């Protein structure tokens, strides 16, 4: 399988970031969160989605009538 130089670069960057945190993904995420908060830029806080808002709670037989009504 041929090597992809773009993916190789992404993997190398990931390895460096993890090495800076001694391989601890949780420590990296917390540090990234602290940097984001310190930047002063707005951070989105999306609402938690539920089955009710995704349509997953609607049986497929009812979904057909919902889709048909929307058209």
Image (spheres, rainbow, N blue to C red):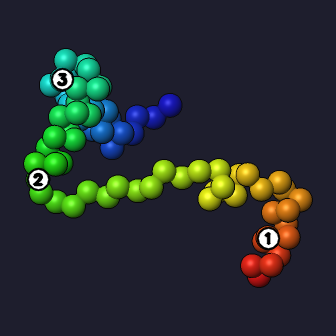
For marks 1 and 2 on the same chain, the one whose residue lies earlier in the sequence: 2
Q: Distance between the residues labelled 2 and 3?
A: 20 Å
Task: Report the mark closest to the observer, 1 or 3.
Answer: 1
> Could you tell me which secondary element the residue under label 1 belongs to?
helix
CB of mark 2 within 8 Å of CB of mark 3? no
Vertical placement of residue 66 versus 12, above or below: below
The residue indicated by pointer 1 is 66
Assess whether mark 2 and mark 1 are in contact (beta carbons under 8 angstroms). no
**Whole-percent x, y for residue 40 in the image:** 12, 57
Look at the image and tell me whether residue 47 can be seen: yes
Q: Nearer the viewer, residue 16 or 67?
A: 67
- Tell me the residue that label 2 is attached to: 39
| Residue 5 in sight here | no
- Badge 2 crowding class, 10 Å Cα cut-off, few under 14, some 14 to 19, many 20 or more, is few
**Tags 1 and 3 touching, CB below 8 Å:** no
Mark whose residue sits in front, 2 or 3:
2
- What is the crowding at mark 3: few (fewer than 14 residues within 10 Å), some, or many (at least 20)? some
Relative to 7, does residue 26 appear above or below in the rendering?
above
Residue plotted at (29% across, 26% down) = 26
* Residue found at the far top of this picture: 22
Indicate left or right for 12 with 39 as reference.
right
Q: Quadrant of residue 55?
A: bottom right
Q: Decide: few, some or many residues near mark 1? Use Cα within 10 Å; few <14, some 14-19, many ≥20.
A: few
Q: Quadrant of residue 30?
A: top left
Task: Please determine whether, in this image, residue 15 is positioned above or below residue 53.
Answer: above
Q: Give the residue number, with chain letter if any, for mark 3.
A: 21
């Amino acid at each position: 399988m041929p090597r992809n130089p773009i993916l190789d670069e992404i993997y190398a960057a990931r390895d460096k970031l993890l090495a800076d945190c001694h391989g601890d993904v949780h420590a990296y995420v917390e540090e990234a969160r602290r940097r984001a908060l310190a930047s002063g830029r707005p951070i989105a806080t999306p609402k938690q989605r539920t089955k009710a808002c995704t349509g997953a709670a609607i049986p497929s037989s009812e979904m057909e009538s919902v889709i048909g009504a929307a058209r």
